[in-house]
Amino acid sequence: MNVADARGYADDLTDPQRAVVLIATAEKPSRFDTIARGSGYEQSDISQAIEQLLSMNLIEKEQSRLAGKFFYNYVLLNDRGVQVQAILRDREDAK
């Protein structure tokens, strides 16, 4: 994920996360510059680190969303499987 992708997810971010995106994309250069000077690293290194942290968070959010969908579908499939088994048992009993 790059900075452009992160901007696309801005609507899903909390306010602190949105602030990180603004810093990482250098839309707030004064804060970004302060972080770089305060840490002793180059701005590009700080930008890359923030971008990596942000993308990790977005990946975790996406994985959580997908896991939720999987679990929901698994429960539905399991319920349907139980229903099918009951129908088959009823048919066998009727014979």
Image (cartoon, rainbow, N blue to C red):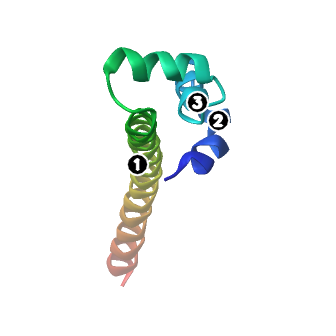
Q: Residue at x 48, y 15 (%)?
A: 34
Question: Which kind of residue does numbered mark 3 sit on?
Answer: Leu
Q: Which mark is residue 63?
A: 1
Residue 46 percent location from the top left of the image: 40, 32
| SS for dot 1 | helix
Image height check: is 16 above or below 77? above
Distance between mark 3 and mark 1 Cα atoms? 15 Å
Which residue bears the numbered disc 2? 10
Residue density around tag 1, few if under 14, some if 14–19, many if 20 or more, within 10 Å: few
Q: Which mark is residue 54?
A: none
Quadrant for the C terminus, please: bottom left
Q: Secondary structure at mark 3?
A: loop
Residue at the bottom extreme, as displayed: 95
Residue 86 percent across, percent down from the top left: 37, 66
Left or right position of 34 against 85: right
Residue 83, relative to residue 28: is it above or below? Answer: below
Name which residue lies at 38% across and 66% down. 81
Q: Could you tell me residue 69's position as x and y percent?
A: 47, 51
Q: Which residue is mark 3?
A: 13
Closer to the observer: label 2 or label 1? 2
Amino acid residing under circle 2: Ala
Q: Position of residue 8 (x, y in %)?
A: 66, 45
Bin the neighbour count of mark 2 within 10 Å (Cα to Cα): few under 14, some 14-19, many 20 and up.
Answer: some
Q: Are marks 2 and 3 in contact (CB under 8 Å)?
A: yes
Q: Nearer the viewer, mark 3 or mark 1?
A: 3
Helix, strand or loop status at disc 2: helix
Q: Amino acid at mark 1?
A: Gln
Residue 91 or residue 33, whichever sits in front: 33
Which circle's residue, 2 or 1, is located before the other in the chain? 2
Disc 3 crowd, CA 10 A, few/some/many (<14, 14-19, 20+): some
Q: Is residue 41 left or right of residue 31?
A: left
